[in-house]
Amino acid sequence: MRDTYVVRWYVLVLPSCHKGPANGLREELERRHRNGEPLFEYFAPSYVEMKKRDGGFVETRRPLLYNYVFIHASEHEIYRMKQWLPQYNFLPRIKDGKHEYHPYLSEEAMTNLQWVADSYSNVIPVYTPKPEQLIKGDRIRITEGRFKGAEASVIIQPGAGKRDVMVCVENYMWVPLLRVQPGQYEVIALNDDGKHIYTRLENDRLLSKLHEALGRFCRQEDGVTEADRQLAAETVQQYGNLRMDSDIMRSKLYALLLPAYTITGNRQESKKLIGTLQAMLPLIKAEQSRALLLTTLYGCTNNCLYHTQAHEIIDKWRQEENPKKSKQQLIRRLDDYDRWLGH
């Protein structure tokens, strides 16, 4: 009898005809809040779905776990609530020796589930780089309009008095990309021509200090310092307008900028850069560049998808007899994020 009053994360199920969010629980919580009655927590995770409609993309949210919801309350409280919300039902009881109980999640398991669900809900599944974010030498495929299906190379970027991005459609003609709107093309390859001096982006001292500052950001209880914010702002000022021609160099650049934006709290630039990285990742073939971006994304977003993908690459390096310095740095960095973020 005493267990019926213990507050746990119980699993409730809705009839299969219910495909929307847990509106009943939301309305009941709002009613209690208005009337000053005891409140409860519930968790009904969703994910972002992008659909193309009328030539553009429309974002909607769908239930991640179909018709399951989780409520943080006692059995007694849930049975009382079911008088007004009969559509919410417990899963069948589980027998454990002489004891029976409704399925529930431990606090630790729920924390992990919320982390996973949050990673899906924050993903930007469709991202098309705007013309000004393309680099000379990038290859695109036009997906809509009169040039649909044609592949092209970016040959002129904005700047130096030029407003249009010019692309050369293979065996056809030069076309201003300004006439091909975002959503009407996709990037199919990044420019990997040209050699650049690596030293400017291989600044171990700067990388180390940004990593330490991001650690204070992740741990929260320490809090970023004014020196951390100043370092991040200087990093953005120094590197924010650099344009790199290869995916390797862009990976190094973005691994500096994303922590800097995160530390300064610049959510708009962080979100924009995360979208750019999501568009880049499928195109990057160099293993270390992928590992660098995935590790950086994980540390800056605490997203379980990047956590898993980074570990898939980096954990193999731990078996190497003598991994090179750059691999050792990424191994340590990933271990730090796991420790700081509690994974």
Image (cartoon, rainbow, N blue to C red):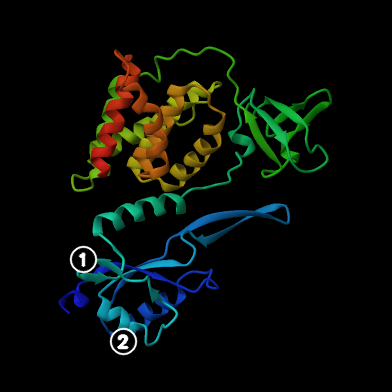
Mark 2 touches mark 1? (CB < 8 Å) = no
Circle 1: residue type:
Gly
Q: Residues within 10 Å of mark 2 (few under 14, many from 20)?
A: few
Kindly state the secondary structure of the residue where label 1 is placed: loop
Observer-side mark, 2 or 1, equals 1
| Screen quadrant of the C terminus | top left
In this rendered view, identify the residue nearer to me: 337 or 343. Answer: 343
Tag 1 or tag 2, which sits nearer the N-term?
A: 2
Left or right of residue 93: residue 165: right
Percent across and percent down for residue 314 are 36, 27
In this rendered view, identify the residue nearer to me: 81 or 342. Answer: 81
Q: In this view, does 271 lie above or below 43?
A: above
Q: In this view, does 218 lie above or below 162?
A: below
Q: Distance between the residues labelled 2 and 1?
A: 42 Å
Residue at (38, 44) in percent of width and height: 304
In this rendered view, identify the residue nearer to me: 109 or 100. Answer: 100
User: Can you tell which mark lies on residue 97?
Assistant: 1
Residue at (63, 24) in percent of width and height: 136
Q: Name the residue under label 2.
A: 35
Residue at (43, 61) in percent of width and height: 45
Q: Is residue 158 among what the camera can see? A: no
Q: Which residue lies furthest to the front in this view?
A: 97
Circle 2: residue type:
Asn
Percent across and percent down for residue 150 are 78, 32
Percent across and percent down for residue 163 are 68, 34
The quarter holding residue 10 reads bottom left
